[in-house]
Amino acid sequence: MKKSAAEILLPRTYKEVWKRGEFYVSAKKVKIIKAHEKQVKVAVIGEKKYSVILKFSGDGIIKQCDCAYSLDGPQARPACKHMVAAAICWDESRRIIRPSKKDIDSHTLTPAPISRQGIINLFKSPLRADLDKIRIIAEYSSWRPQPHARLPNMPKISRDSRRPLKISEIKKAFSEMEKWAERSLYDPYFCAGEMSAAFCELLDVIKKRIDKTEAGEIILIIALCVDWFYRKFNKLIDGIEGVWIFPPVRIGNIVSILIRRHPRDPAWQKFNKIVKIAGESANKKNLNYRVVEEWKNEKLQNKSKNKS
């Protein structure tokens, strides 16, 4: 019995990608260059001419394409549209019928909760980024997700805007988050988004409780947030995917609000001392409240960029 390349690729492909691959075949943009029983080389005409190689291996298939999506990628990466087109074309050249609409609907991969463009959009406007999407960035940026601890959405702290906020509450929240990293399945990479989102949730609570909190207290609380960002947060996560950027943007936004409300409060002097020392621990010199205020405008230009 002849093997079907399309049947093997089907459960390794997103439905929308499969449809695009079918379009290439229907539009006659696919040409077999060389084929034998176990392997085929195909040319697919898209934005340019792409070369695809498919090779049966045991019960699976080895796939290669020189498009930007697939080039040098792991075999675990879902199939691209050019691979789909090549598989269908190869099958039909051997008189194997392509998968039915029912099979496509039933067996293709479930669409990811966040697309690559969706991830890019998060970084375009970090202050308004959806925290639930930040939590899953690593899982959908990696082609080899691993089991890892699931962290709480935020540490335990009151959201009641009628209550003045105390430094002790923030210290307790930070302590709780540090303990999350001691969990057996905590992974600095795969848990980074969840840790970043939880920090953001805490900062949102701080912002919500500003009105009822004494100026000097809230200014020192934000100084402690800067200190924790440098001394703990950046050591608890692997921020290669850029998720480190979201908390500092919120910190900068809160500092901007406090400067407008309390521009001459003496607590800013202590704030500057705290953040200066914290910054120096991460080789960031001359950090002060004006520099931290500018964090509100931070955008990730490059994931290898130095942290704030």
Image (spheres, rainbow, N blue to C red):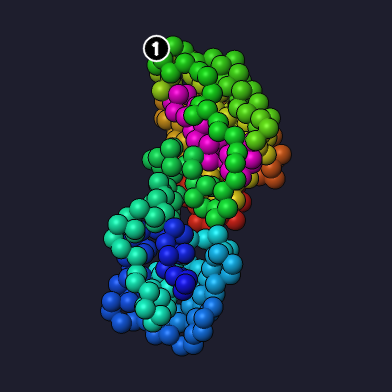
Q: Which quadrant holds residue 282?
A: top right
Q: Farthest residue in the front direction?
A: 1
Q: Is residue 229 left or right of residue 296?
A: right
- In the rendered image, residue 201 lying in the magenta stretch gets the answer yes
Q: Which residue is mark 1?
A: 162
Which residue: 34% across, 59% down?
A: 104
Q: Which residues are magenta?
A: 186-207
Q: Which quadrant holds residue 155?
A: top right
The residue nearer to you, when weighing 259 against 5, is 5
Residue type at mark 1?
A: Arg
Q: Tell me the element at label 1.
A: loop
Main secondary structure type of the part rendered in magenta? helix
Q: Mark 1, residues whose alpha carbon is within 10 Å: few (<14), some, or many (≥20)?
A: few
Q: Is residue 64 left or right of residue 88?
A: right
- Where's residue 26, x and y in %? 28, 76
Q: How many marks?
A: 1
The residue nearer to you, when weighing 12 against 39, is 39
Does residue 71 appear anywhere in the picture? Answer: no
- Where's residue 126, x and y in %? 44, 44
Which residue: 66% across, 30% down?
A: 183
Q: 282 above or below 38?
A: above
Which residue: 42% across, 62% down?
A: 10
Which residue: 55% across, 64% down?
A: 59
- In the rendered image, residue 48 lying in the magenta stretch gets the answer no
- Where's residue 33, x and y in %? 46, 88
The residue nearer to you, when weighing 213 against 106, is 106
Q: 189 above or below 10?
A: above
Q: Farthest residue in the top direction?
A: 163
